[in-house]
């Protein structure tokens, strides 16, 4: 088990990079074959009383929220996206947020910190509706989400959520195929302007992944990357595996309108089995 509460389960072929260290978190260009994440930490050393467990997690999240709010990382991140976020919001005023792949709040320090960033974003942008989904969320995770007025999505959409209003998809360190599915579900010059994505850097995917791998797992990322406005999160957070390699991705109306219409027409639905990183 990793120290942040994820157990990594591998199946099938070994990594094509001999000697590469297994990582429980997706990184652009990672080459693992079959990866599954299973939250096991909540089953170990767990105090019996669920209410005291819940209080402990809520305290931990609050502590992380206040630590993050005071960090130069957070101030810098918010400053760097302020202009793009203002333009993104201006179409409706009210944004929704969809959190995918944050993991288990009950079992992971990283998940709690990433969740704390969602709460801070809510303080700034006053989301109209907050949604959350990760297939490994436990009953306790759901109770924590409920405490903060997040709606837990009741089906596994595998990222294929089409939105009709401006929506920020917050997807820290998800697999490429999950971003790909979000893009596919909102594919189109005007539809894409309705979404923004916080997730693994598309730029880095395109620079570091094998062309054939990206074509298989993230063809929509590959197509749209050159037309995307990407703002990287600063790299000065003290815990360097929490917000590393993450960027805000925006799809400006002027950039989308300039794209050849053929791109929008050739958009086959990604197969369910397109990636082992989607559960
Ligand atoms: C590499 S982990 C990242 C976890 C955490 N965000 C981090 O940075 O450590 C990828 C996450 O994506 C989640 N995931 C897999 N399939 C998903 C799906 N269909 N919808 C939402 N999340 C999914 C996994 O359960 C896992 O928590």
Image (cartoon, rainbow, N blue to C red):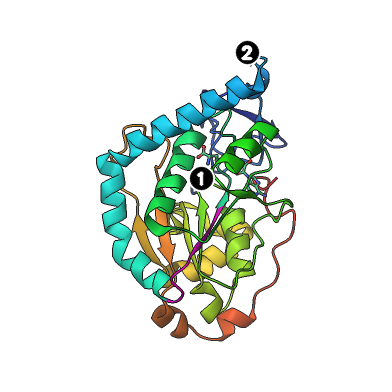
Task: Please indicate whether residue 148 sits to the left or right of residue 82 in the image.
Answer: right
Residue depicted at 63% across the width and 82% down the height: 265
Task: Please indicate whether residue 136 sits to the left or right of residue 128 in the image.
Answer: right
Residue marked by disc 1 = 173
Q: Which residues are magenta?
A: 91-98
Task: Please indicate whether residue 125 sits to the left or right of residue 55 in the image.
Answer: left
Residue 83 in the image: x percent, y percent? 30, 66
Residue 109 seen anywhere in this rendered image of the structure: no
- Name above or below for residue 123 compared with residue 222: above
Element at label 2: loop
Q: Please give the label number shown on residue 45.
A: 2
Q: Compute the Cα span from label 2 to label 1.
A: 27 Å
Residue depicted at 55% across the width and 76% down the height: 191
Residue 62 within the segment the image draws in magenta: no
Q: Quadrant of the C terminus?
A: top right
Indicate the quadrant where residue 15 lies: top right
- Name above or below for residue 217 compared with residue 224: above
- Name above or below for residue 191 compared with residue 262: above
Local packing at callout 2 (Cα closer than 10 Å; few below 14, some 14-19, many 20+) is few
Residue depicted at 40% across the width and 58% down the height: 125
* The residue at label 1 has a CB less than 8 Å from ligand 1: yes
Please tell me whether the stretch drawn in magenta is mainly helix, strand or loop.
loop
């Amino acid at each position: 088990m990793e120290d942040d509460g994820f157990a990594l389960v591998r199946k099938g072929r070994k990594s094509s990079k001999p000697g590469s260290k297994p990582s429980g978190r997706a990184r652009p260009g990672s080459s693992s074959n079959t990866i599954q994440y299973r939250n096991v930490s909540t089953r170990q050393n767990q105090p019996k009383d669920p209410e005291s467990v819940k209080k402990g997690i809520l305290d931990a999240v609050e502590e992380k929220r206040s630590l993050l709010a005071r960090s130069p990382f957070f101030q810098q991140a918010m400053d760097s996206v302020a202009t793009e976020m203002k333009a993104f919001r201006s179409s409706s005023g009210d944004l929704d947020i969809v959190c995918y792949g944050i993991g288990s709040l009950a079992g992971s320090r990283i998940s709690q910190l990433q969740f704390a960033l969602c709460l801070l974003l809510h303080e700034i942008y006053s989301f109209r509706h907050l949604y959350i989904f990760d297939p490994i969320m436990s009953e306790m995770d759901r109770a924590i989400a409920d405490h903060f007025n997040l709606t837990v999505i009741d089906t596994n959409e595998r990222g294929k959520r089409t939105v009709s209003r401006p929506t920020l998809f917050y997807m820290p360190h998800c697999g490429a195929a999950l971003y790909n599915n979000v893009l596919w579900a909102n594919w189109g010059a005007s539809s894409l302007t309705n979404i923004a994505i916080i997730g693994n850097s598309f730029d880095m995917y395109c620079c570091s992944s094998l062309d054939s791998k990206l074509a298989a797992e993230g063809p929509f990322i590959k197509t749209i990357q050159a037309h995307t406005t990407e703002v990287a999160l600063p790299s000065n957070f003290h815990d360097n595996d929490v917000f590393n390699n993450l960027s805000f991705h925006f799809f400006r109306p002027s950039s989308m309108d300039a794209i050849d219409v053929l791109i929008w027409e050739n958009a086959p639905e990604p197969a369910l089995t397109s990636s082992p990183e989607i559960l």
